[in-house]
Image: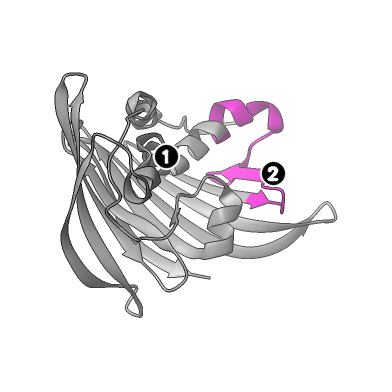
Amino acid sequence: MKIKSISILCIITLLIFAAGFTYSHAEEISEIDEIILPEELTTFIEIFDELSYEAIYDKEIKTEINYKFEGTETLEEEETSRISITMISDETIEASLWINDEDEIILTKIDDEEIPSFMEEQFVKPLLAGIFSPFELLEKFQLEEILSEEIEGVSTEVLETREETYNDDLTAEVNKIKITVPEYEGEETTTTVEIAEFEDFNMVVSYSFEDEDIEFKLKDIVLR
């Protein structure tokens, strides 16, 4: 079986940064409702028909993720949702996954080759880490707590509010917010986050950890 090895340098880089964010934070600055930070493939399936985003680390290591819902299929008498994932980094990975309602992966194909269960640790887990790591970083940063609770130590500032259109017909009000955490490991840390308020949910569409050279940007979104 000739399957390209998934490059995980960028994934490891992001997870190392994510592991370090355990701040305490500041005063309430926004009435923005709960922000969706996908942690399961079923969350993608329930909300998105298509989703494209990219993350850049150290201004050089770039990963682009393109997700698409392909429909439902019955495998081994079990109803599954089929999704396709394209991960573009130092190489391009094309993957198809069949997921049941319990968020269990029933079948995986990478570059049209079926991945046996004993190889999932090597190929599937790095793929999933690449998909979820940009959102996991925000969980570690405790973004929702910053925006909704009185937590000492963080200053926040709304820099801009604008209307943005995605995929020609999906509009959202986007709030650009600057977050400053004083004296994290002896230095002030600045983060800029853009949160889109769609009709039924809110989602981070970009962020930049200036001191760590980490950036994330939503490129396109199509809802189910």
Of the 4 image quadrants, the one containing the N terminus is: top right
Q: Say whether residue 64 is left or right of residue 127.
A: left
Number of marks drawn? 2
- Mark 1 residue type: Glu
Callout 2: SS: loop
Q: Residue at x 66, y 47 (%)?
A: 103
Does the stretch in magenta take in 198? Answer: no
Q: Disc number at residue 77?
A: none
Q: Which quadrant would residue 165 be assigned to in this image?
A: bottom left
Residue bearing the label numbered 1: 139
Instruction: Identify the magenta region.
Output: 98-124
Q: Nearer the viewer, mark 2 or mark 1?
A: 1
Query: Residue 219: x, y in percent?
Result: 31, 59
Q: Residue lying at the far top in this picture: please name it.
A: 186
- 97 is higher (above) or lower (below) than 221: above
Vertical position of residue 201 compared to residue 106: above or below: below
According to the picture, the residue beneath numbered tag 2 turns out to be: 104
* Residue in view at x 69 percent, y 44 percent: 104
As rendered, which of 185 and 61 lies closer to the eye? 185
Residue 100 in the magenta stretch? The answer is yes
For the point 35% across and 67% down, the residue is 197
Quadrant in which residue 196 is drawn: bottom left
Q: Residues within 10 Å of mark 1 (few under 14, many from 20)?
A: some
